[in-house]
Image: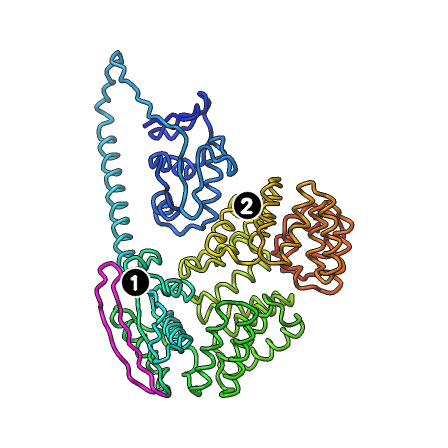
Amino acid sequence: MTYSFNNYLLDTENFKLSLNGKLIEVEPRVFDLIVYLIKQKGKVVTRDELFEMVWHGREVLDATLSNHIKSARNVLGDDGQSQKVIKTIHGRGYQFIAECQIVTHELNTDEKPAAKLPGKYLPYLFLSIVAVLIFIFSNSSHQKNKIARDEHKKSIAVLAFLDMSPQKDHEYFSDGISEEILNKLTHVTDLRVISRTSSFYFKDKELTISEIGKQLNVSHVLEGSVRKQNNKVRITVQLIDTKTSNHLWSETYDKTMNDIFQIQDDIAMAVSKKLKLSLLPKTSKPVKVNKDAYSEYLKAKFFSQTNTRENNVKSELAIKKSIAFDPNFAPAWQFLANNVFVLHYDSGLRSVKTRTKIALFAIKKAIELDQNFAPAYAILARVQSQNLQFEKSDQNMQKALSLDKNNSYILDIAALNAMYSGDIDRALNFRAKIKDINPKYFRNIYNIGLLDFTALKLDSAIESFKLFIQHKPENAMTHHMLSSVYMMQGNNKLALEYANKEKDGFWKDYIMCMALFAAGKIKQADELLENFLIERHYSRVNIARIYASRGEIEKSFEWLLKASDRMDSNLIAWLPYPEFRKMHNDKRWHQIVRKMKFPTSHWLMQKLPQ
């Protein structure tokens, strides 16, 4: 089959692409991608469909697909801005939109009859045919086996349990029980368990089990309800097949709060048995905790989900109450560390020094109480990375992953640490794993955008940030980052448009300093920067980035050196940004990068002169 469009000819039989008769070199996978999009002309093709039909179901990063789309556009004289051949339908997929015709070749009847093959070659021809048939048969068998394995692969999402308490005031408790059971199921062999963020995404949404199963790509769903009154608790659960909506198993547990952990173990065991899988042996100590401490612990986790300043304060108060009720509960100490170091980092409730001190104390307590509690090692790795202790951080990260490799929280920290260590490919691999078990964790999409921006994969970064905005339009910093990408592309009009849409005051002032200057509104940019220097003088790395974007290299170095002299930990996140690339050959840059004690494998270290 040959397709004609925009003076191009695409010959699918001979795998050739030509423009006005001149052959164009095309990477095989890019060629296959173009062919598939043309065959689906007029239809919006989802990313998942492309992964299945072009990559044949192999695990592929979103960034890989984005790069292949970019390459396809390049060979077809298209780009991410004009999109006159391949159009991006944000949040949906791609569409081939160029006018296209099928070219028919008439058979030439004057051709000479085909020459006969000499008899002496017939045995070789026979052997060749046999070899081809064997190859086809074995390949077909392999594909059938693969399909069979995929069909038998078990996966599950634990939906947020309903709060059936009389006053409907125990949502934190029903959510917490759901998550605790989910965490136990991650220790079932050969079971893919969807993480909390994605499983709870469907809370209060009117979707069928079948629809949820399709969106999360799971074979089973566990749903239930919790009724808590004083010291009594009733938990009802049911296991459902997402394809048939059949209820495979259900049970009601009427117990006291003293039995809460045994109930969770019983449910995890029952689910694993019903799915004919085995529960891994426990690595952590059996949990014994005061019921009030446990209740406050679940309350702290509930408040932390929104990540607002007000609820972060409530979360910290609840976790401190939990520790007061029972100081021997390791998860509470770990969560205090996470609360103080990570959540307060986002809301600026404490200085870095204070956060670090409290977090390290809490982590030490958690590990003393349970040496096999994986999240404690993960948050320790995060703190150490932020404090430029990259080798120690990596050791503790590996410890956390060895104890629990299927935990989305741990994988998220692993991805961040890999990014801070300058290993972009490794960070993307962790992000791919998170996408598999937590597809509705949209912050993951944002972080993939950051990695692509750092690597100057600008079209891919735009796709990620726009998709994130589609799901989380009110989130801080996202419009800031999208504006930054457009500036790097030289699209200063769009950069200013998105800078104006930034929701957070700090991030808006920051990006407007850059976007106004890039758009040629120098007077406004200077006035805003003057005010920013007065009100945000402590934000040294960000001021350095503003000056770098303006091309004022000396002033940028002045602020970078101020940050470096104070060993500002924000440098590990911002130094890789593209605005600083023009400064990479300066000796002062080399001095700053070396001072950060990055691993020698960090791509910034690799660029330094020997």
Residue type, mark 1 in image: Lys
Q: Quadrant of residue 136?
A: top left
Q: Position of residue 317 (x, y in %)?
A: 54, 80
How far from the left and from the top, in percent, is residue 220?
A: 29, 64
Q: Are the two marked residues, 1 and 2, in contact with CB atoms closer than 8 angstroms?
A: no
State whether residue 605 appears in this view. no
Residue at 28% over, 45% down: 139
Considering the numbered disc 1 on the image, is that residue within a helix, a strand or a loop?
Answer: strand
The residue sitting at 46% across, 31% down in the picture is: 76
Residue under label 1, please give it. Answer: 154
Disc 1 crowd, CA 10 A, few/some/many (<14, 14-19, 20+): some
The secondary structure that most of the magenta stretch takes on is: strand
Along the line of sight, the residue nearer the viewer: 168 or 359: 168
Q: Nearer the viewer, residue 459 or 307?
A: 307
Where does residue 302 sit, x and y in percent of width and height? 46, 73
| Position of residue 167 measured from the top left corner of the image (x, y, whole percent) | 37, 79
Question: What is the magenta range?
Answer: 231-256
Identify the mark nearer the N-term, 1 or 2. Answer: 1
